[in-house]
Amino acid sequence: MTIQDAEIIIVGGGLAGLAAAVSIARAGFDTIHLAPAAPPDRRTSALMMPSVDFLLRAGLIESPAAVGHPLTAIRIIDATNRLIRAPETLFESTEIGQPAFGWNFANAKLLERFGAAAPATGLSTRNAAVVAYHRENGLGHVSLADGTTLSAPLVVGADGKKSLIRSAAGITAREHAFGEAALVCDLELGRPIGNTSIEFHYPHGPFTLVPAGEKRANLVWIDEEKLLRETQAAGPEALLAALRTRSQNLFGSIALASPSFVFPLSVLSVAEAGRDGTVLVGESAHAFPPIGAQGLNLGLRDVADLVAVLAEADRSAPDWALTASTAYARRRSGDLQRTGGMVDALFRSLLAEMIPAQALRAGGLWALKLLPPLRRSAFGIGMGQRRA
Ligand SMILES: Cc1cc2nc3c(=O)[nH]c(=O)nc-3n(C[C@H](O)[C@H](O)[C@H](O)COP(=O)(O)OP(=O)(O)OC[C@H]3O[C@@H](n4cnc5c(N)ncnc54)[C@H](O)[C@@H]3O)c2cc1C
């Protein structure tokens, strides 16, 4: 008979995997976290207030101000030459009675903070990648490159878009790749943008400056992958010239404050987020273009729901992990469908060349600009507030 090595094994050392490992171990589960060394995560994440509240409740951060920068307003500028253009629109968090919509964090800083919140006992972290996974006799068995096999009743796949755990567990995923990608880098601006995130909407996607404190901003530029790679390859001067043009020279001087990185974009969804003792969190379960700041927000809601399901688990029952994985899949299904559908539709509407789609989008922004109740309910959905 195989002996279990832990109650739960979590695979993947990104933000979703680390948040899951630390909060599950803090909840009293004997946990192994398999987190192979990975290149530094240069992305930044705008997290909406419900996600920030979760991080505080779970003890993953002590104060957002110690790690990030507040986002109190969002300005949208239609920079297309389309026939039907949207109005320039400013959304402020005070309209929904909140001091901020959320906070902007460097992923590397969040990883550091989550790691510091790990409990002294109950969590064993290993710098090891999984090469195979199967289930037998009520246990999930993960094989590591050095030939070791580790076993646990519940296995959490937090191993990103190309998840091995997902495919080995037979969970079907659908992925659609776009021709667009996102270029990210840090900028030092001549004129500060305060706490306002500024989005210029171009035909191939938004060019967004997210405030990172004082004159710093994090750029997320979505455009055709070919154009982004060519601009990047042409060197820093060519990149800066493109950034000045795209930002309509609104910010005085612009200097690069970090190297730039390009991320190809796709949407990925799964038929179910868990079954038969395996569950998926973060990008192993869902991925989409970084618009409306949803990816990690959704990943943290996965973690919050997993912790809630585990709090109700009866660990004396022999099949507790199977029950928990089914309960988790059921609990996540509505949110995954709703958020995935919303971001996909929004992204396609931003790219749409068809006049009716342009009219709908422009009309939508006019409606948001003019109708306060609609603005409030749109904010609620964008911020990931749950439906009753
Ligand atoms: C440009 C850009 C901007 C974004 N901005 C925002 C934003 O503002 N707000 C927001 O909410 N979201 C944002 N996102 C999305 C967010 O960054 C992701 O949702 C989040 O970082 C995904 O975390 P993850 O842990 O699920 O996946 P990953 O970060 O991909 O981590 C997966 C981990 O699994 C490990 N792994 C892979 N295979 C194995 C294996 N076989 N064994 C063991 N480990 C393995 C990898 O090494 C990696 O560390 C953005 C994304 C991009 C691309």
Image: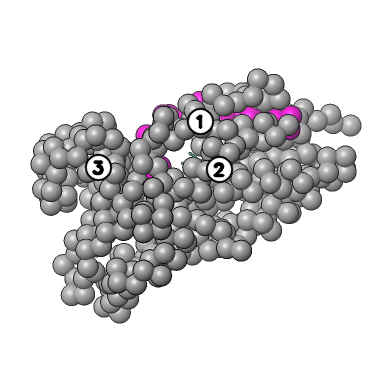
Sequence order check, earlier mark of 3 and 2: 2
* Residues at marks 3 and 2, CA–CA distance in whole angstroms: 25 Å
Point out residue 125 in the picture as x, y percentages from the top left corner: 62, 24
Type of amino acid under label 3:
Gly
Q: Nearer the viewer, residue 275 or 78?
A: 78
Please tell me which residue is depicted at 67% across the width and 25% down the height of the picture: 123
Disc 2 versus disc 1: distance between alpha carbons? 11 Å
Q: Residues within 10 Å of mark 2 (few under 14, many from 20)?
A: some
Sequence order check: which comes first, mark 2 or mark 1?
Answer: 2
Q: Which residue is mark 2?
A: 54
The residue type indicated by label 2 comes to: Phe
Query: Which residue carries the number 3 mark?
Result: 194
Asked if residue 248 lies left or right of residue 258, the reply is: left
Q: What's the residue at 21%, 75% (across, down)?
A: 84
**Stretch of the chain drawn in magenta:** 29-46
Membership of 30 in magenta stretch: yes
In the rendered structure, find residue 287 and report the number of the disc placed on it.
Answer: none
Residue 296, position in %: x, y? 48, 46
Q: Which mark is residue 62?
A: 1
Q: Which mark is first along the chain, 3 or 1?
A: 1
309 on left or right of 297: right
